[in-house]
């Protein structure tokens, strides 16, 4: 997660202006850090002193501002110290925000991914959901959704989501002033920093879009909600989804995906069914770029040569079987 955004949420919380979702997010970080007090033991005395001084400065600055404005100083200073400690640790030792939580055998790590490539990038989330992230966009998500009531992620930019259905664990995408809630669907979100509008477009399924707990609308396939951040207003309309999400068909950067994961992307792009006859093949991983105008058979041939596989089309070339040579 962007450090400046974390600090922004922290300040909103202390002023009592944070939304329910933002407060829950901060609470989760507080609880995780609170369970990791022994993490300080890994730092030198010099770093501990530096951390303490930074925390004191942050608290002093915050209290000074609150008192100068004749506002109530919240009686949560112990809580703030721990959250501030987490923030300062992150600022000192990390370029992106990570959190660790040791629950017997499980550790969770927040992944902050920014696409620096000129190509779109494919991301497979911990629940198997697929995200295509456009260049310059950023996504923050946990390494595991286990033990969480919601599958929550943060998007800065544009992404296309194909979400695994799970009624017991809703999927929530936070983007600036709005949140998009789904159970299982395919949709596009455009929330480019600096642009005045956030746009949510549904390809399959149903999503609910909210702002500060107020429902802006529930949309289904070929429907779109546009939220104006400056006017704090929204409108819904019917659209041609395929044309609006055509950006995801451009060059695609595949980074350490399994053959099974890549096959699903290729099936959607080329409308050809891929059958992997030996299950051991599906777990093989590779990294490459699928260019926009590349022929399906050329891609398939490259994958098979690299992994020593063979393939065979049916007569109509609507289906291909892949097997070990």
Image: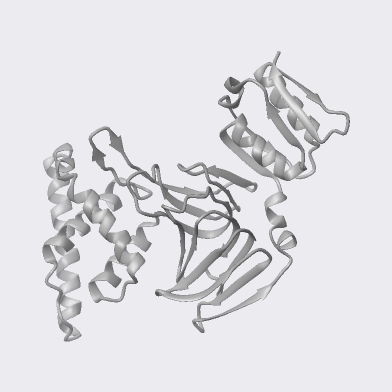
Residue 145: x and y in percent read 39, 46
Q: Would you place residue 107 above or below residue 202 in this image? A: above
Residue 56: x and y in percent read 13, 62
| Image-quadrant location for residue 67 | bottom left
Question: Outermost residue toward the right?
Answer: 315
Q: Quadrant of the N terminus?
A: bottom left
Name the residue located 26 percent from the left edge and 43 percent from the top edge: 101
Q: Quadrant of the C terminus?
A: top right
Residue in the foreground of this view, choosing between 95 and 153: 153
Give left or right: position of 319 versus 111: right
Question: Outermost residue toward the front?
Answer: 167
Residue in the foreground of this view, choosing between 302 and 54: 302
Give left or right: position of 9 versus 154: left
Residue 256: x and y in percent read 55, 32
| Image-quadrant location for residue 235 | bottom right
Q: Would you place residue 217 above or below residue 201 in this image? A: below
Name the residue located 79 percent from the left edge and 39 percent from the top edge: 294
Name the residue located 16 percent from the left edge and 86 percent from the top edge: 70
Q: Would you place residue 18 above or below residue 27 in this image? A: below
Give left or right: position of 323 versus 31: right
Question: Outermost residue toward the top?
Answer: 325
Name the residue located 63 percent from the left edge and 70 percent from the top edge: 224
Q: How does the figure colour the protein chain or chains?
A: one colour
Give left or right: position of 139 versus 63: right
Residue 155: x and y in percent read 49, 58
């Amino acid at each position: 997660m962007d450090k400046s955004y974390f600090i922004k949420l922290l300040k909103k919380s202390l002023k009592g202006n944070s939304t329910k979702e933002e407060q829950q997010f901060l609470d989760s970080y507080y609880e995780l850090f609170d369970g990791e007090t022994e993490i300080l033991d890994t730092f030198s005395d010099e770093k501990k002193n530096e951390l303490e001084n930074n925390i004191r400065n942050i608290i002093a600055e915050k209290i000074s501002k609150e008192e100068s404005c004749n506002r109530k100083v919240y009686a949560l200073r112990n809580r703030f110290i721990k959250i501030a400690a987490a923030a300062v640790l992150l600022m000192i030792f990390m370029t992106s925000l990570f959190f660790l939580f040791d629950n017997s055998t499980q550790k969770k790590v927040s992944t902050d991914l920014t696409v620096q490539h000129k190509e779109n990038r494919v991301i497979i989330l911990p629940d198997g959901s697929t995200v295509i992230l456009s260049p310059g966009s950023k996504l923050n998500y946990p390494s595991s959704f286990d033990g969480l009531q919601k599958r929550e992620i943060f998007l800065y930019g544009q992404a296309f989501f194909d979400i695994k259905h799970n009624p017991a664990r809703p999927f929530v995408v936070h983007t600036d002033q709005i949140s998009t809630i789904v159970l299982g669907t395919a949709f596009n979100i455009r929330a480019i920093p600096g642009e005045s509008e956030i746009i949510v477009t549904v390809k399959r399924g149903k999503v609910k879009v909210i702002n500060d707990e107020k429902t802006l609308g529930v949309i289904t396939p070929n429907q779109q909600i546009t939220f104006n951040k400056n006017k704090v207003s929204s409108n819904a309309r019917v659209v041609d989804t395929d044309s609006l999400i055509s950006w995801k068909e451009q060059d695609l950067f595949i980074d350490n995906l399994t053959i099974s994961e890549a096959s699903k992307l290729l099936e959607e792009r080329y409308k050809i069914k891929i059958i992997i006859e030996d299950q051991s093949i599906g777990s093989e991983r590779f990294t490459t770029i699928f260019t926009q105008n590349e022929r399906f058979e050329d891609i398939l041939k490259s994958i098979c040569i690299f992994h020593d596989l063979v393939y065979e089309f049916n007569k109509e070339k609507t289906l291909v079987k892949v097997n070990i040579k």
